[in-house]
Amino acid sequence: MRARRLTRSLTCLVVVSLTAAGCGLSGGGSSGDGEAAVGNCKVDKGNVGSGKLSGDIKGKITFQTTNLKKDFGGFFNGVIKAFEKANPGAKVKWIDDPGDATFTQRNVADAQGCTLPDVINLNAETATALTKHGYLLNLGAKDPSSAKPFVPAFWKSSTMKDAKGASVHTVFPWYTGGVLLTYNTSMLKKAGIDPANPPKTIFGLFADYEKVAKSAKGKYYATMANPIWRIPADWDQMDIKTLSADGKSATFADDPRTTQWVEWMAKLYKQGAMPKDSLSSSNDPSTPYSQGQVAYGSTNPSFVRFVKQNSPSVYDKTGVGQQPFDALGHTTGAPQYISVASTSKNAPTALAFAKFLTNAENQTAWCKDPNVVIFPTTTESLDDPFFQNATGDDPFAQARKLVAEQLKTATAYQTVISPAVQKAIVSQVQLAMQGKKSPEQAVKDAQEKANELLKQGG
């Protein structure tokens, strides 16, 4: 789900570092009695600046989701109906965006044209672009109490930069995924690894991969080779700074642990911990794990359900454990967000609906839908028996409880790099894994190539 949502910038409309003049974007300003300006849009003065938003909950608003209507039409229509019943003067029109590669471009263009939906489901990239130019309501200022339902760490970290570079709350963290270790307990035991005590660090996990390789002797493997699945996720968990604070330059080569990480990857590949033909394969561990070919599966909690449904014999041997917290000390999430357009003609209604949609009751209800494996961002939801009452040895129930527990301290800080930058870094690591470059040289070259791309706009 995360990969599908992270669409990338394509044109001037969506490159957030461009000047306001270059793209026709600007922040809010006064334009007359009772009105303010956001870009070329005239809005109510109450929508911008400081001061709590006030007004009646009435009128029509448009609510836009991202690729959800096909599978969850019944749920969201029910939420809308309940909101309209509680607020007889309000009417919600629901539209659904496909969430493709031009998602950010389309929504910024809508904002420029003063047609941005009133309540909108956004990823971090699009929210960043819209926030910088004032197109999203400052939720922290307009309704300070709106923070209360959310996991404190998630709320604190769910900020975007405004035109002045200040961190502002223009998004409600909505639903998120999670990460965990999934593994074949039989294979781990043969390697002398205790499945009940997963490693606490990434390098500790690599050491277990090495043990599996020695035990398997080529009959099966520890994991897949392509580092695309691990960069920058592993580095985030190790608290290696992939990018500078402003995101304009790569910094991962400045940390000696990055070279150590590449050294480990090269050694594991050489020792047979990974299938040789998987170095450049786009396949994740899902299928080979289900076929008993690798000891460690996908880190996505929904993968555990996939194994349960498609490979019962392997599921019986499947265990779940905490993905190493490492130096970071907690996990991170890449939540989907809900925002309110500052250009909304009925902002009080839009804000009320955004809060209703993301409240604990509705988040919990959606997460219980059997067609989805997602996790809520409210404290009350994570404490619900659905997540906490894992019984017996069922891996899927244990996975749900484990991820729900770790999300109580999770943040939304995940490094987001463009596909081009990621590919440049990954290709250098692959050369080191093949023995064509030293790990030190590969890391140095990877940073240089990443910086070249970043200077070009990603």
Image (cartoon, grey):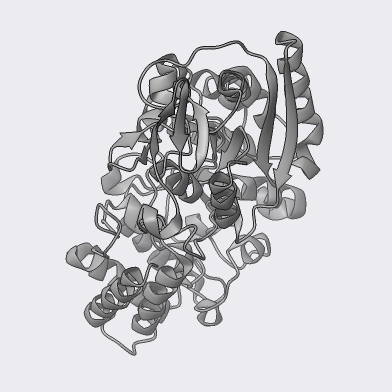
Give whichever of 315, 375 is nearer the camera: 375
Give whichever of 305, 234 is nearer the camera: 234
- Reply above or below: 374 against 190: above
Q: At 69% across and 19% down in the image, what residue appears?
A: 59
- Work out which residue is located at the far bottom of the displayed protein and give it: 436
- Reply above or below: 442 against 161: below
Q: At 31% across and 76% down in the image, what residue appears?
A: 452
Q: Position of residue 55 (x, y in %)?
A: 55, 12
Q: Position of residue 101 (x, y in %)?
A: 60, 61
Query: Looking at the rendering, in which quadrant would you find the C terminus?
Result: bottom left
Left or right of residue 166, residue 81 in this image: right
Q: Is residue 343 visible?
A: yes
Left or right of residue 30, residue 262 in this image: left
Q: Can you tell which quarter of the image residue 434 is in?
A: bottom left
Q: Can you tell which quarter of the image residue 269 is in?
A: bottom left
- Reply above or below: 418 against 165: below
Q: Position of residue 383 (x, y in %)?
A: 53, 20
Give whichever of 221, 162 is nearer the camera: 162
Q: Can you tell which quarter of the image residue 357 is in?
A: top right
Left or right of residue 388, residue 230 in this image: left
Q: At 45% across and 21% down in the image, what residue appears?
A: 33
